[in-house]
Image (tube, rainbow, N blue to C red):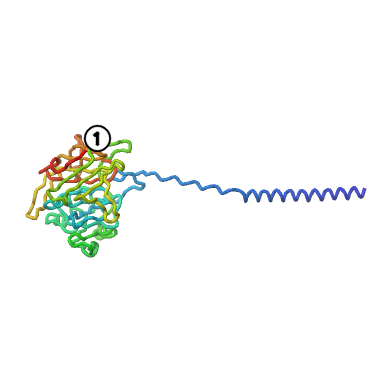
Amino acid sequence: MFKSKKLLIAMALTMLVIGGCSKDSEKAKEDDDEDMVEEQPIAEQPVQQPTYTAPLTGEAVQQEITQRPIMVTINNHPAARPQSGLAAADIIYEMLAEGDVTRFLAIYQSELPEKVGPVRSARSYFIDIAKGYDAFYIAHGYSPEAKTMLENHVVDNINGMAYDGTLFKRSRDRVAPHNSYIASENIIKGAEMVGASMNYSKKVLQAFYESDEHGKIGIETSQIDVYYGNNNDFHNSYVYDHQSNHYKRQSAGVDTKDMLTGETLALANVLFFEMNHRTLDNVGRQAIDLTSGGNAYVFQNGYLREVKWANVDGIPMAVEQSGEPVKLMPGKSWIHFVPTSPGLQAMVKTQS
């Protein structure tokens, strides 16, 4: 009996030990299982799709553009080439300033380059265009008519005549008047100094093609040439690149490049507006009629359309017969003003 009791106790102790070992084994297995759990890959964040459209280019952007347009008069004398900041402009206008010499009006809203220039003087019709866009206007110098308009605050502006050496800097590699530049931070600083708001308030009503619209309307054209007078320095060419669907620009046989980036300008739209010009003085300064409307050419997607232009809320625009703005391809645009005499047919030549 005593042996039987001892046997039972021994068996019970054995069961306890086995049970304990079993629990320890199970816990060890659980710990091993926890160590063996692979880290789950972190789910990739979805790419934010563009939800806004840039007002002046029609391109999709991820953030709403609230920057007021900034318009700069840029020198186009051969001694001023290549210019800085052209590639960042949404729209560039080219027109006569005096004689057969043209100047650019570069409009910035989608982006502002590090530096712009060489900056040149204002004309009255430059200021009229700036007013149409409600742009903050930048120039260095002025004609007598433009000086009066600027002094009367027709547009918010800063001028290099008042800020030469402070907001406007002279480069040493070029001679005056082809060496005045303004940095982007000085544009913003200048606006603050004159109390100009940089918020986008006046909306531009330009129309653009949707992504599923090809915009191939008119006469197929591969190259465009425009001649301002007989001076080859102001002979501009545009060649359509079928791969990029953009026009590459040349002036006097040289690619139009941005000195800041080294890139050749790529344009989605090239437009020509035929306008009445009148010579004001013996210097050859011009008065250009921006209001009466007239004939226009629109080049996009390798095609030419003959349309009209009209002044729409202060801005010369290509328009349909209905008066609605002509749709442009999303991207940057270059707009030429050409004199009614000799006119579009004489000044603008095309090759198919």
Is any part of residue 47 visible from this angle?
yes
Label 1 crowd bin: few (<14), some (14–19), many (20+), radius 10 Å: few
Give the amino acid at mark 1: Ile
Q: Is residue 285 left or right of residue 91?
A: left
Looking at the image, how many numbered discs can be counted on the residues? 1
Query: Relative to the observer, which residue lies in front, 131 or 88?
Result: 88
Q: Quadrant of residue 195?
A: bottom left
Q: Quadrant of the C terminus?
A: top left
In x, y percent, where is residue 49?
39, 44
Query: Relative to the observer, which residue lies in front, 235 or 80?
Result: 235
Residue at 9 percent across and 55 percent down: it is 283
Is any part of residue 203 visible from this angle?
no
Query: Relative to the observer, which residue lies in front, 25 or 77?
Result: 77
As displayed, is residue 47 above or below residue 80?
A: above
Helix, strand or loop at label 1? It is loop
Residue at 26 percent across and 36 percent down: it is 216
**Among all residues in the image, which is located at the extreme right?**
1
**Among all residues in the image, which is located at the extreme left?**
282
**Among all residues in the image, which is located at the extreme front?**
253
In x, y percent, where is residue 162?
19, 62
In x, y percent, where is residue 340?
11, 43
Q: Which residue is mark 1?
A: 217
Query: Relative to the observer, which residue lies in front, 16 or 259?
Result: 259
